[in-house]
Amino acid sequence: MTAAVHVHRGDTAGTGYDILIGGGLMRDAGTLLARVLPEKPSALIVTDQNVGDLYLKRCVNAMEAAGWRLLPPVVLPAGEATKTFAHLEAVVDHALEHGVTRDTVVVALGGGVVGDIAGFAASVLLRGIRCVQMPTTLLAMVDSAVGGKTGINTRHGKNLAGSFHHPSLVIADTDMLATLPARELRAGYAEVLKYALIGDPVFFGWLEEHGAVLLAGDAALQAEAVRVCCAAKADIVARDETERADIRALLNLGHTFGHALEALAGYDGRILHGEAVAIGIEWAADLSAHLGLMPAAEAARISRHLLSAGLSGQPPFAVEAAEIVLKMQADKKAKDGRMTLVLLRGIGRAFVSRDVPPDTVRGFLQDRLGGQTGGLRHA
Ligand SMILES: NC(=O)c1ccc[n+]([C@@H]2O[C@H](COP(=O)([O-])OP(=O)(O)OC[C@H]3O[C@@H](n4cnc5c(N)ncnc54)[C@H](O)[C@@H]3O)[C@@H](O)[C@H]2O)c1
Ligand SMILES: [Zn+2]
């Protein structure tokens, strides 16, 4: 069954797009795309090595069978280290070398890494050509493929160069999650949980009931979770497309802590983005309870759920409270050393806070890290 979520774009009426979610959609990718781009311009598929090995041929066949003319695909190395100027340049050069035109559509087939760099390349090629996102990880399906943010990392930090470039269509074939390594699936689940905690307590209850089976690979539950999360993200993005109000910022629940942990690990793979976010979510919940904003019982319920999903625990490397706070203050969302935190008044009641003093956060983290045993507890 295919579900469709429409992303309305508030300040640019008529330029919204659909997110199609369901099993087996890749088979029909060429036809689905032709519905949005009926003139069937040329297409450039960008993917990474892992996804390419598994799905590139299928994607090429599906597109060609529907009559698309394809430029030779780009297969990037897999992993976060690919989100660099050098690889961006390689994609842009490749496209120019093979006759990209203003009508060409870039097809980003992969996880968030591919989606971010391919989307960014599309936004700068010939001053901007269209792109289509075909997310293949849970994280990309519920988060990075939706909302129009693209980018690469620079030596100054993560995602510091990029653009807002919305896709013309998102096709999330949830069958592809079957080959995703369990650790990646779990990491994506942290983002799923994020939506429940931001604004949907009923969804949180649903996850408590079904999370374990979903993580064990149940395709129908996975598709349903992707649908709920995409609807939530579409709603948030429609209300605050370019993050000027404090609405889109809610999507950063768990991320101020999480980004600091990722930065301290040097993006070396010891901690995945979603794993860092999961720890960040637990800290945000506990800090909220610590500050008396949320009942301790609700924070405990969140911790229990993270634990059952194999996402609870301490960072898998030694880290000090002071260095985390320093990184948080250096975050691109911090202003004058005051960090932006997303805290909770309860499950489903997130809000943006800029008034927690750094010393308070440092003290809280010192307690939290005091009994550090190291390592995420994988279920
Ligand atoms: N633009 C946004 O709004 C946004 C939001 C959240 C995250 N992000 C970015 O997304 C990136 C993380 O994305 P990710 O978690 O998808 O990581 P990823 O793209 O690195 O994918 C994770 C791993 O899984 C492999 N893989 C992907 N799909 C697979 C499949 N179906 N079967 C088997 N293996 C598969 C990949 O090759 C890779 O090794 C980060 O760079 C982050 O900054 C962007
Ligand atoms: Zn995230």
Image (spheres, rainbow, N blue to C red):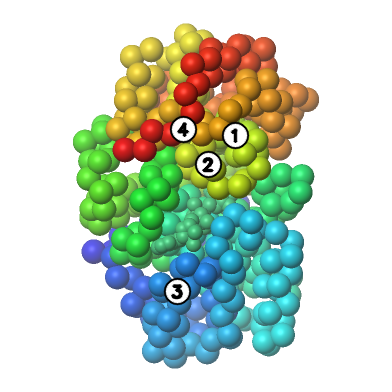
Question: As shown in the figure, which amino acid type bears the numbered disc 3?
Answer: Asp
Q: Which residue is mark 2?
A: 271
Q: Label 3 vs label 1: CA separation?
A: 31 Å
Q: Is residue 26 left or right of residue 320?
A: left
Q: Which residue is mark 4?
A: 375
For residue 53, the mark is 3
Mark 1 is surrounded, within 10 Å at the Cα level, by few (under 14), some (14 to 19) or many (20 or more) other residues, namely many
Q: Label 2 vs label 4: CA separation?
A: 9 Å
Look at the numbered discs 2 and 4 and tell me whether their residues touch, using CB distance below 8 Å.
Answer: no
Q: Which residue is mark 1?
A: 261
Q: Label 4 vs label 3: CA separation?
A: 31 Å
Look at the numbered discs 2 and 3 and tell me whether their residues touch, using CB distance below 8 Å.
Answer: no
For residue 348, the mark is none
Mark 3 is surrounded, within 10 Å at the Cα level, by few (under 14), some (14 to 19) or many (20 or more) other residues, namely few
Q: Is mark 4 within 8 Å of ligand 1?
A: no
Q: Secondary structure at mark 1?
A: helix
Question: As shown in the figure, which amino acid type bears the numbered disc 4?
Answer: Gly
Residue 334 seen by the camera: no
- Of the two numbered discs 2 and 3 on the same chain, state the one appearing first in sequence: 3
Q: Camera-side residue: 22 or 110?
A: 110
Look at the numbered discs 3 and 1 and tell me whether their residues touch, using CB distance below 8 Å.
Answer: no
